[in-house]
Amino acid sequence: MISTSDFRNGLVFEDEGTIYQIISYQHHRKSQSAAVYRTTLRSLTTGSMVERSYASGTKFREVPVTKREKTYSYDEGANAVFMDVETYEQVSYPKERLGDQAKFLQENMVVLGVYIDDKLTSIEIPPNVVLTVTSTVPGVKGDSVSNMVKPATLETGLEVQVPLFIKEGDRIRVDTRTFSYIERANKEE
């Protein structure tokens, strides 16, 4: 059993039969009232985000979480197929549960499969990936105003805003959480 004093970002626990992961939390205490923990949680069964408040000292069942490396193999209709790195077992996972992050999947990409009670509940994509720009408008010489951006389409079909100096064929690093350009990547990456 864990209590609210054990809360930390990423902690997985069960509340009223639903398994949640803490995205963020804040401890609030007003002068005359009991302390309260305000949390932002992700349901690991549905993927939805909820906000909940818990009284200080509330107890929950901690859920054992294991993570196993998997590689993305291919798409199979509405599912993505991943292969376990250790056992070579293939598992099919609905792309709708990945949401917009499914647009980052590339062949042989290493991801983490999150297992709760030996059941695959979610897939964690790396925080940033390197992708090739397949199309973008050329930057105009003389455009030197800082923070000028243009749209670029990447090899997976994802469209992001990039600086004017990026051209077709460049490899760029993209943040998978914010869908934003980070930097130009080396040719070897």
Image: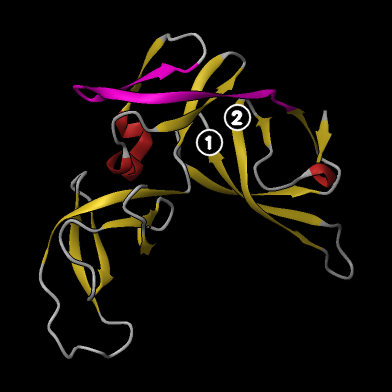
Magenta portion: prevailing SS class: strand
Q: Residue at x 27, y 42 (%)?
A: 103
Count residues near mark 1 (Cα–Cα under 10 Å), then give few for <14, some for 14-19, many for 20+.
some
Residue 137 magenta:
no
**Hey, which residue is sitting farthest right in the picture?**
32
Q: Percent from the top left, x then y, of residue 111? A: 45, 32
Q: Earlier in the sequence, mark 1 or mark 2?
A: 2
Q: Amino acid at mark 1?
A: Ser
Circles 1 and 2, Cβ within 8 Å, touching? The answer is: yes
Q: Secondary structure at mark 2?
A: strand
Instruction: Residue under label 1, please give it.
Output: 43
Q: Is residue 85 left or right of residue 37?
A: left
Picture residue at 34% right of the left edge, 28% below the top: 108
Q: Secondary structure at mark 1?
A: strand
Q: Which mark is residue 19?
A: 2
Establish if 113 lies above or below 86.
below
